[in-house]
Image (spheres, rainbow, N blue to C red):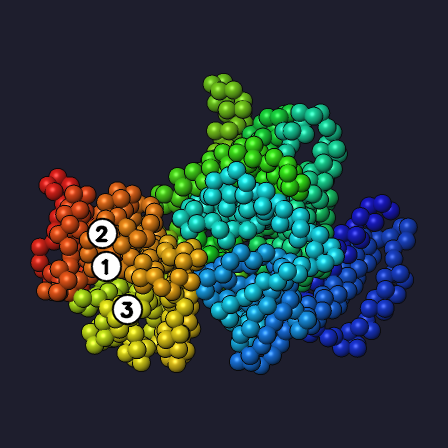
């Protein structure tokens, strides 16, 4: 009878999870007939319960009826939950002007120059999209904003629907008030705010931003270069709170629990208590709650002795997370977390046995190997989903995650300890943060090293659900075959030459390599970021517009972006027409002066433009954008603009200077760094280095500021950025003497090859594969560095 009780519970849980999973596809208000089936199903279950002497067929029929009845209950529960979620959304006719007042209900996210703030207002939940420089805004703060209501952007409509948000309020200003959320949510907001402030004390800026990502799931302050390293090395999951992170947090605490001599049950309870503390410290948002549930399920699944208990834990986590929000299954984080948990369930224990055999559970060695096995199993299991959602496969994923492993757990433990101790304002957290910064710096260095090779990230397309299913079928078969092969080979003569642990490690190493090779060979692969067939990589054209600036950046997987339009009447729109460019993702106006923005009106009349991007608030630019049907979009230091995989990151000016309307416009000119794969180009506009103190790091190409005018800060900029090529946009026989002799000499002294539009005409730079090259429209001698110094590759 005990066995039957276990079976019916598992059947009920499976049915309920299935019903909840399907509820988004069903009507939110079921018919009366469907509701009426529920009591009939209960009566049937009671009447058909098998008695003693039951046959297997009767048991199976009864279990099937339980599963169907639970699925119906899950369907009805999910529908009711979805109706409640959708009922809390603000709805109005698009284009309606509105004033919104409420409380920030989630973590604000910065995308380029836009800040997206979810707000709970008396009128309903809404996303406030603020275009322009905005200060820090925290969950739970009171905010006010006025603007125009619009449907969500298509790329985030599904995400917002899962949050119960149906409209976006577009505005260029949001004001914070003195009020805060009350009740339990307000208490959690306070805990999170104190933890956030504590993580910033006594820690370098980069490590502090990483700590906020690791512990609180807030990755908006992490600079673009570091974020790209983590993405390419497949360590990006560390920058946001996920179920896999929570599992690692707990399982990697095993050495400490083992040293304390705790039993298995005590260690499990301790790990679950760790999760219970972690969730409120990180703010207890929906994604963090889900991560806590998944982490607890993965922990039980990894440690349970009976397979049925493991699957029960996973199904319970599925049911709980879907009962909270039935649309959670559409979230990429949900899918990746459960893929990681299932991979841990299937392979981590067998990997441990393969590596160290039957070493005692209480040993530190076994606990450390369990951490490696969990990391490997989770990384392999999430591979097909990464290819499906991000068209990316990272051969660097396994070595990066394994090498980072020794510092991941301490970084999270120390960060959480800071969050706890920091609840007391006067408590000294600086020593903890100093240790934490060392761990975070190590992880960032591993990410940088493993992101550097051209093979670190490959593009693998799995466009359909069936291709994902086929990939997982192949992955399961390959892993099963490899693990069985390794187990059969334990008795080979290798054991006579090496200790058993070394032998097992060497035999297990091909598991990861073979899986990687299987995926790479079996699927259509091309270098990540390379152009589709028939096109090149990124093409940058420094247009010849006389004494002015206009640079076209054309990525292979996105619409082109034009930085500045040159002087009026110079025909930049005609050149775009010759190039076949009839639409632009954005026109960036670095500053509103004639030689940079004079051609804007003519361009907007002939070319379809999605956004007009600028820094200083400028009613003229805003009006020009709106009249042409484009979106005005303000950008400042730290902001970002993307098109495909092309990223334009603003380095200057900082937000606080944009209110200084009396300052020289050249000094407040937007300075951008364009990044595509490993190619980078600094676009300085007219902001000379002496007035715009920036540190872009190493770059490939420099667009010399202000048409090559004299710049006292150029020497320091060249010393820090070490460009291989400099381009100067300048008109022939201009009356200003540009480029200045001092500037040309400075470039020559730093061995920088120089190209000029007054001599070479339009300059084209093509970045593809692992390198890049530059060519000129006119065959005129290029200013080369001194003999023996190489120019651009």
Q: Residue at x 74, y 75 (%)?
A: 30
Mark 1 Cα shell of 10 Å, populated few (<14), some (14-19), many (≥20) = many
Q: Which residue is mark 3?
A: 593
Instruction: Tell me the quarter of the picture where residue 248 sits.
Output: top right
Mark 3 Cα shell of 10 Å, populated few (<14), some (14-19), many (≥20) = some
Q: Position of residue 245 (x, y in %)?
A: 59, 44
Q: Which is more toward the observer, 248 or 280?
A: 280
Q: Position of residue 133 (x, y in %)?
A: 46, 62
Instruction: Tell me the quarter of the picture where residue 104 sits.
Output: bottom right
Q: Position of residue 706 (x, y in %)?
A: 23, 59
Residue located farthest toward the top when viewing the structure as drawn: 496
C-alpha distance separating marks 1 and 3: 12 Å
Q: Residue at x 42, y 62 (%)?
A: 659
Q: Position of residue 690 (x, y in %)?
A: 28, 50
Q: Which residue is mark 1?
A: 706
Q: Taking 729 as reference, is 522 left or right?
A: right
The reply to whether residue 455 is in sight is yes
The reply to whether residue 407 is in sight is no
Q: Which residue is mark 2?
A: 711
Q: Which is more toward the observer, 362 or 579?
A: 579
C-alpha distance separating marks 3 and 2: 19 Å
Q: Taking 132 as reference, is 490 left or right?
A: right
Q: Is residue 177 above or below residue 272?
A: below
Q: Taking 166 as reference, is 115 left or right?
A: left
Of mark 1 and mark 2, the one earlier in the sequence is 1
Of mark 1 and mark 3, the one earlier in the sequence is 3
């Amino acid at each position: 009878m005990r066995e039957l009780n276990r079976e019916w519970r598992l059947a009920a849980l499976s049915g309920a999870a299935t019903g909840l999973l399907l509820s988004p596809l069903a009507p939110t208000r079921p018919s009366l007939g469907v509701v009426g089936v529920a009591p009939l199903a209960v009566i049937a279950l009671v009447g058909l319960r098998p008695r003693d002497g039951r046959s297997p067929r009767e048991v199976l029929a009864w279990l099937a009826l339980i599963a169907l009845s639970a699925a119906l209950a899950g369907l009805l529960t999910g529908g009711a939950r979805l109706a409640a979620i959708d009922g809390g959304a603000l709805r109005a006719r698009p284009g309606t002007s509105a004033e919104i007042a409420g409380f920030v209900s989630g973590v604000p996210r910065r995308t380029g120059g836009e800040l997206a703030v979810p707000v709970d207002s008396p009128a309903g939940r809404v996303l406030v999209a603020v275009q322009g420089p905005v200060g820090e805004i925290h969950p739970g703060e009171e905010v006010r904003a006025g603007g125009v209501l619009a449907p969500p952007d298509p790329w985030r409509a599904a995400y917002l629907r899962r949050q119960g948000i149906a409209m976006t309020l577009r505005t260029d200003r949001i004001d914070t008030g003195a009020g805060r959320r009350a009740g339990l949510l307000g208490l959690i907001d306070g805990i999170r705010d104190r933890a956030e402030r504590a993580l910033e004390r006594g820690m370098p800026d980069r490590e502090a931003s990483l700590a906020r990502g690791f512990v609180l799931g807030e990755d908006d302050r992490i600079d673009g270069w570091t974020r790209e390293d983590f993405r390419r090395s497949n360590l990006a999951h560390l920058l946001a709170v996920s179920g896999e992170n929570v599992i690692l947090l707990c399982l990697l605490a095993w050495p400490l629990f083992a040293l304390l001599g705790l039993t298995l049950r005590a260690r499990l309870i301790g790990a679950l208590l760790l999760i219970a503390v972690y969730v409120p410290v990180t703010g207890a948002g929906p994604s963090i709650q889900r991560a806590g549930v998944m982490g607890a399920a993965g922990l039980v699944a990894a440690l349970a002795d009976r397979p049925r208990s493991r699957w029960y834990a996973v199904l319970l986590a599925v049911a709980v997370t879907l009962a909270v929000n039935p649309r959670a299954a559409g979230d990429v984080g949900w899918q990746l977390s459960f893929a990681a948990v299932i991979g841990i369930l299937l392979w981590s224990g067998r990997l441990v046995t393969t590596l160290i055999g039957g070493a005692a559970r209480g040993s530190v060695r076994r606990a450390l190997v369990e951490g490696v096995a969990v990391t490997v199993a989770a990384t392999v299991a999430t591979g097909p989903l990464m290819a499906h959602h991000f068209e990316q496969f990272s051969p660097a994923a396994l070595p990066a995650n394994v090498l980072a492993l020794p510092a991941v757990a301490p970084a999270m433990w120390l960060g959480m300890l800071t969050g706890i101790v920091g609840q007391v304002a006067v408590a000294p957290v600086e020593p903890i943060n100093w240790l934490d910064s060392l761990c975070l710096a190590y992880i960032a260095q591993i990410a940088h090293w493993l992101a550097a090779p051209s093979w670190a990230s490959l593009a693998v397309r799995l466009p359909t659900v069936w291709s994902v299913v086929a990939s997982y079928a192949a992955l399961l078969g390959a892993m099963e075959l490899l693990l069985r092969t390794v187990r059969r080979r334990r008795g080979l003569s290798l054991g006579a030459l090496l200790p058993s642990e070394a032998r097992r490690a060497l035999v297990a190493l091909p598991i990861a390599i073979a899986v990687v090779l299987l995926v790479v060979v079996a699927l259509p692969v091309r270098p990540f970021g390379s152009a589709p067939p028939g096109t090149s990589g990124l093409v940058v054209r420094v247009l010849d517009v006389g004494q002015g600036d206009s640079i076209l950046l054309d990525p292979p997987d996105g619409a082109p972006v034009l930085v500045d339009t040159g002087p009026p009447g110079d025909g930049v729109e005609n050149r775009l027409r010759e190039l076949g460019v009839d639409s632009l993702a954005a026109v960036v106006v670095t500053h509103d002066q004639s030689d940079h923005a004079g051609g804007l009106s003519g361009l907007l009349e002939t070319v379809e433009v999605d956004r007009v991007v600028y820094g200083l608030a400028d009613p003229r630019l805003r009006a020009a954008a709106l009249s042409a049907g484009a979106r005005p979009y303000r950008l400042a230091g730290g902001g970002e603009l993307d098109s495909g995989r092309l990223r334009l990151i603003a380095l200057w000016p900082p937000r606080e200077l944009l209110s200084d309307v009396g300052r020289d416009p050249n000094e407040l000119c937007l300075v951008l760094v364009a990044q595509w794969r490993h190619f980078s180009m600094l676009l300085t506009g007219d902001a000379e280095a002496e007035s715009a103190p920036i540190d872009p790091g190493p770059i490939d190409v420099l667009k010399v500021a202000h048409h090559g005018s004299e710049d006292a800060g150029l020497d320091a900029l060249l010393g820090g950025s070490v460009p291989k090529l400099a381009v100067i946009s300048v008109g022939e026989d201009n009356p200003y003497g540009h480029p200045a002799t001092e500037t040309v000499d400075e470039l020559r002294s730093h061995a920088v090859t120089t190209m000029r539009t007054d001599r070479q005409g339009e300059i084209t730079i093509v970045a593809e594969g692992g390198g890049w090259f530059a060519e000129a429209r006119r065959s005129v001698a290029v200013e080369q560095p001194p003999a023996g110094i190489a120019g651009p590759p």
